[in-house]
Image (spheres, rainbow, N blue to C red):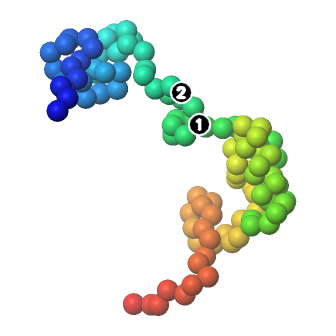
Amino acid sequence: MTEPKVCRHCGRRRANRARGLCWTCSTNPEIREQYPSRTANPNGLGSGRWYAPLPPSPTRARPGTAAKLRVLEARAAAGLSLFHPEDPCLEVLPSVPFGIRVVRSPFRVPDG
C-alpha cells in the first residue's frame, strides 16, 4: 500500500486538493499562488472552463446534412464555437421560455 500524499505546503495534513495541497492550505490564496497547477492545460479545451468565440455568422445548413458537418468541421478547425445561436434547428417550441431550443422526439410518449 502506498503512503498517503501530504500537503506540499504544511506537510502535516493529507493532500486532497489540486496542486498537492490540503484543504486548509488550498483555501488560502497567498499559499495557493506559490504552487503552480499540475494540470498540463488547466484552461484548455475539454476542461469545461474554456469558451470558444461565436462564429461570425450563422449557417443556413440544416442539422444532420453533409453541409452542416462541413460547417462544424470548419468551425472546429478555426477554434470557434461549433454552434451559433441563430443556426437552424430541427424545431422550436413556442411555449419554451428564454428562447431555449427543444427538439421534439420522433417517438410518442404515452400519456399518463
What amino acid type should be assigned to the residue bearing mark 1?
Leu
Q: Quadrant of residue 69?
A: bottom right
Q: In this view of the protein, which residue sits in the foreground, 95 or 89?
A: 89
Q: Quadrant of residue 107?
A: bottom right
- Quick check: marks 2 and 1 in contact, CB under 8 Å? yes
Q: Would residue 17 appear left or right of 69 to someone viewing this image?
A: left
Is residue 60 positioned above or below 57 on the image? below
Q: Which quarter of the figure is the C terminus placed in?
A: bottom left
Q: Secondary structure at mark 2?
A: loop
**Residue at the image position 51 percent from the left and 25 percent from the top:** 40
Q: Residues within 10 Å of mark 1 (few under 14, many from 20)?
A: few
Q: In this view of the protein, which residue sits in the foreground, 96 or 89?
A: 89
Q: Would residue 103 appear left or right of 80 to someone viewing this image?
A: left
Q: Residue 8: x percent and y percent?
A: 27, 14
Q: Would residue 105 appear left or right of 59 to someone viewing this image?
A: left
Q: Which mark is residue 45?
A: 1
Q: Which mark is residue 41?
A: 2
Q: Residue 1: x percent and y percent?
A: 17, 32
Q: Residues within 10 Å of mark 2 (few under 14, many from 20)?
A: few
